[in-house]
Image (spheres, grey):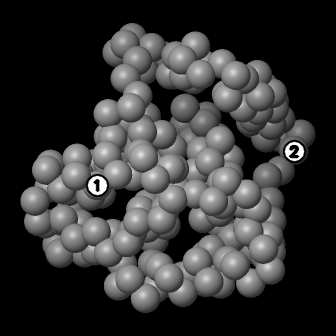
Amino acid sequence: MALNLLHSAGLTDRVYGPTLTLKVVEQAAAEGLPIYLYGSTEPTLAKLVPALEEMFPALKIAGVEASKFRKSGPGEAVEIAERIKASGARIVLVGLGCPRQEVFTYAMRPLLDMPLLAVGAAFDYHAGLLKNPPAWMQKYALEWLWRLGLEPKRLWKRYILLNPAYVSRLLAQKLGLWKATPPAPATEPVETFAV
């Protein structure tokens, strides 16, 4: 909706992290491109990996790394990048939760020469830990309300504080009152924890 509002993108449907994840993983499996799964928890990843391998038998998972649930220390971002590169991965799927996964992928851009894709709760959905909201909620961009209802203690700040801030900036940008400018690539520390 935001891309349509600001840039007349003509998108007829939303880009849904779990669906996008499956499309990317399917294509990676078809082309033999190894993937790296970064974020979430060990138990989630332990369920996610076999679920993806069952859906896509040809899939090559080069590496899996759970969130550390803390900010990285000096030089740790480079170490993370080195582990990812050493794995042979060609695509990195990042599941740290919004907005931390976007901060992480942006910060890692100068350190990695492969696409990093922030996929939201896709790891949890495909690991079978989260149930999809009803279709009508998805159609009207109300999945956030569904998620808030499922995990109010964990997600209230994200949706009650960040959603209004996002909508305010979106409207200010549309009205020409504010111009979004990307920050310089992040350096240390990189947030490596899920929310």
| Residue 178: mark in rendering | 2
Q: Position of residue 49 (x, y in %)?
A: 28, 55
Q: Earlier in the sequence, mark 1 or mark 2?
A: 1
- The residue positioned 54% from the left and 86% from the top of the image is 82
The quadrant holding residue 151 is top right
- The residue positioned 17% from the left and 75% from the top of the image is 32
Type of amino acid under label 2 = Trp
The quadrant holding residue 185 is bottom right
- The residue positioned 33% from the left and 41% from the top of the image is 127
Mark 1 surroundings: few (<14), some (14-19) or many (≥20) residues within 10 A = some
The residue tagged 1 is 49
Q: Position of residue 111 (x, y in %)?
A: 61, 84
**Element under label 1?**
helix
Tell me if 29 is positioned left or right of 97 in this view. Answer: left
The residues bearing labels 1 and 2 have C-alpha atoms spaced at a distance of: 42 Å
Picture quarter with the N terminus: top right
Tell me if 153 is positioned left or right of 83 in this view. Answer: right
Say whether residue 142 is visible: no
